[in-house]
Image (cartoon, helix red, strand yellow):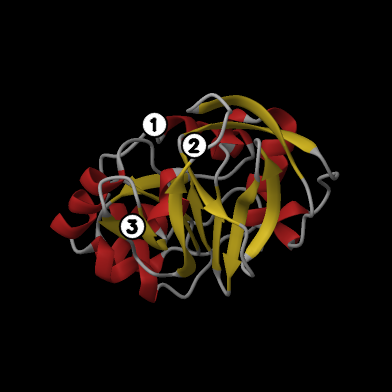
Amino acid sequence: MTDLDKVKEISPFGGLKGGVVIINYGAGNIQSIKFAIQRLGYEAILSDDVDVIKSADKVIFPGVGEASSAMKKLKATGLDVLIPTLKQPVLGICLGMQLMCNYCEEGDTQGLAIFDCDVVKFNNNEKVPQIGWNQIENLKSDLFKGIKEKEYMYLVHSFYVPLNDEAIAITDYGIKYASALQEQNFYGVQFHPEKSSKAGEQILKNFLEL
């Protein structure tokens, strides 16, 4: 069975016709995301195939690592061209969200320009990188259905997105910054929902049910 056959299978829960694809471009711990989705009763496949990604009902764009090297991997497979054209719900996680912005200071990296904002390095008195649990607030999207204000999420990052009109969640780490973004069918979260206990699983569930 090919990747394309797999993604066309109906999910056991939620009735997703095209299934869930996690973009596999060699950046980050994507298995933990796959396992989190499976715990919710959905099947997800890992793929860098353009046709497979285009055929999915939901796309997750993860990332852990350095921005410029991750962008090079996207360009090597043409995913930098594909991702901004996707019409189904897309969720960028951590570096995935940052790469969806216009520009990232890390590695002087031009992003995918899905979100009209830049990514800058923390330059305050707090320890960098930010590692551990922090709160999200000012929640503005169906992505956060059932999530209470000031819920804790798990974060690991040295760069952040300043507050902007596309912010759908805010976190305070010495300064207030955008910890989640939305532009039409594109969503991004700076935190790791797959590592954020029941609340994180609820956010993944909400995304899969959009």
Residue at horizontal 70 percent and vertical 53 percent from the top? 169
Vertical comparison of 146 with 28: above or below: below
Q: Point out residue 53 in the picture as x, y percentages from the top left corner.
A: 35, 62
Mark 1 or mark 2, which is nearer to you? Answer: 1
Distance from disc 2 to disc 3, alpha carbons, whole Å, reads: 21 Å
Vertical comparison of 19 with 36: above or below: below
The residue carrying mark 2 is 33
Circle on res. 5: 3
> Depth check: 110 or 35 in front?
110
Residue 21 visible within the image: no
Q: In the rendered structure, which amino acid carries the disc numbered 2?
A: Ile
> Depth check: 6 or 191 in front?
191
Counting residues from the start of the chain, the first of labels 2 and 3 encountered is 3
* 12 on left or right of 135: left
> Depth check: 166 or 177 in front?
177
Q: Point out residue 210 in the picture as x, y percentages from the top left corner.
A: 66, 63
Q: How many neighbours does mark 1 have within 10 angstroms: few (below 14), some (14-19), or many (20 or more)?
A: few
Residue at horizontal 77 percent and vertical 55 percent from the top? 139
Q: In the rendered structure, which amino acid carries the disc numbered 1?
A: Asn
* 201 on left or right of 1: right
Distance from disc 1 to disc 3, alpha carbons, whole Å, reads: 24 Å
Q: How many neighbours does mark 2 have within 10 angstroms: few (below 14), some (14-19), or many (20 or more)?
A: many
The residue carrying mark 1 is 29
Distance from disc 1 to disc 2, alpha carbons, whole Å, reads: 8 Å
- Res 66 → quadrant: top left
- Res 207 → quadrant: bottom right
- Please identify the residue farthest to the left as the structure is shown: 76
Mark 3, secondary structure of its residue: helix
Mark 1, secondary structure of its residue: loop
* 115 on left or right of 163: left
The answer to the question of whether label 1 and label 2 lie on touching residues, with beta carbons closer than 8 A, is yes
